[in-house]
């Protein structure tokens, strides 16, 4: 989210799903959970995570592939259902993050301005996980970072109606539950599990990529930041946790570079490509991967490594939106 106007929503979207999880635990303990609830949770979780990973992240932020207008709108709406913020704001924050990852100006680095030691580490992890969203003064101007998206009337419309779409994303799993079990109880518990519980789970998985993914894990590439690959997080994040791979090649449509690096979003994008619903899918050849790894190893990486970030998109000579993004 962005600025003071969204502070109330961030507070509500953090507390209400948590309270929903507590209610779900009570119901689960008393065996008040049905198949319809779990189906609603699975469907809505998959839609929300794909919306963030394939939609907000790989399509809109990094333009890792192209697709038709209906698929673009569907993915933008699916990302909005996750409740992490309007598409324009989310993408602006993320492009800013890539410009200065783990350096001054990064919206959610776990390393900036925190005291040393365990306490400072915990403060940094909290900030990068969720705390940064409560900064009323934080702003990443979409006109500066995302002029291409700011000119897209579909993305503007979806962003403008963010709250309504989030609410619809809570009601929809209730309808799924009602369609399966045909009771009003299944409608309510469907909204609980597929709505509030799903928001809690999906959002904290995404937030963990920002926090854990810059603190713990393996580094294949010595990128000028602290990004890590976190294998156990790759399944629930649909491939987003191959984060060091992503920071080495931000425009890559596929974040898993080896056969065992499971990337469910990549499978989804491939399926769109096979059915001709996606094109211009950015792939990174193995020789380029090897050359990049060797080059970064020679220069050295980490947050203290020197970096020359590109200018925000609006400040480049080709600011009409044709300029490449990170």
Image: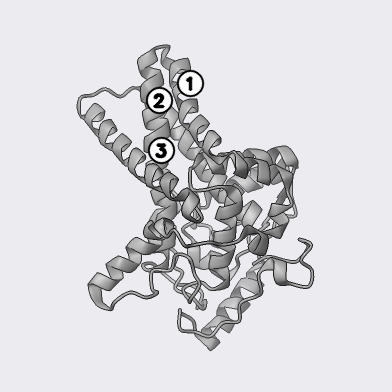
Horizontal and vertical percent position of residue 121: 29, 71
Would you say residue 283 is visible in this rendering? no
Which one is earlier in the sequence, the residue at label 2 or at label 1?
1
Identify the residue at the far top of this view.
182
Dot 3: element: helix
Please report the residue visible at 59 percent of the width from the left and 63 percent of the height from the top. Answer: 95
CA distance for labels 2 and 1: 7 Å
Please report the residue visible at 59 percent of the width from the left and 49 percent of the height from the top. Answer: 87
Which one is earlier in the sequence, the residue at label 3 or at label 2?
2
Quarter of the image where the C terminus is located: bottom right
Would you name the residue on which mark 3 appears? 198
Q: Is residue 96 left or right of residue 34?
A: right
Which one is earlier in the sequence, the residue at label 3 or at label 1?
1
What's the colour scheme?
Answer: one colour
Q: Is residue 288 left or right of residue 31?
A: right
Would you name the residue on which mark 1 appears? 175
Q: Compared to 135, does 170 lie above or below? A: above
How many numbered marks are there? 3
Identify the residue at the far left of this view.
30
Would you name the residue on which mark 2 appears? 190
Residue nearest the viewer, comparing 284 with 258: 284
Would you say residue 258 is visible in this rendering? yes
Quadrant of residue 77 within the rendered picture: top right
């Amino acid at each position: 989210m962005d600025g003071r106007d969204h502070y109330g929503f961030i507070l509500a979207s953090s507390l209400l799903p948590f309270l929903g999880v507590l209610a779900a635990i009570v119901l689960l303990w008393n065996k008040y959970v049905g198949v319809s609830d779990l189906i609603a949770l699975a469907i809505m979780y998959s839609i929300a995570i794909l919306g963030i990973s394939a939609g907000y992240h790989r399509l809109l932020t990094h333009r890792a592939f192209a697709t038709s207008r209906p698929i673009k709108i569907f993915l933008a709406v699916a990302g909005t259902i996750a409740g992490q913020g309007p598409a324009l704001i989310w993408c602006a924050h993320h492009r800013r993050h890539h410009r200065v990852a783990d350096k001054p100006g990064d919206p959610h680095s776990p390393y900036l301005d925190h005291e040393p030691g365990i306490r400072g580490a915990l403060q940094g992890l909290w900030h990068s996980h969720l705390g940064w969203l409560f900064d009323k003064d934080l702003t990443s101007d979409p006109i500066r970072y995302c002029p291409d998206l700011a000119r897209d009337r579909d993305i503007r419309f979806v962003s403008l109606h963010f709250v309504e779409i989030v609410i619809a994303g809570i009601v929809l799993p209730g309808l799924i539950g009602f369609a399966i079990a045909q009771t009003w109880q299944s409608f309510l518990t469907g909204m609980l599990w597929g709505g509030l519980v799903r928001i809690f789970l999906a959002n904290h998985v995404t937030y963990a990529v920002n926090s854990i993914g810059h603190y713990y894990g393996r580094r294949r590439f010595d990128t000028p930041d602290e990004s890590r690959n976190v294998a156990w997080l790759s399944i629930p994040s649909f491939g987003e946790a191959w984060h060091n791979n992503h920071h080495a090649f931000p425009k890559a449509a596929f974040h898993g570079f080896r056969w065992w690096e499971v990337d469910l979003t990549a499978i989804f994008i491939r399926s769109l490509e096979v059915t001709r619903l996606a094109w211009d899918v950015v792939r990174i050849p193995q020789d380029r991967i090897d050359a990049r790894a060797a080059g970064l190893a020679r220069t050295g990486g980490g947050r203290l490594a020197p970096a020359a970030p590109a200018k925000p998109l609006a400040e480049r000579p080709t600011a009409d939106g044709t300029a490449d993004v990170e």
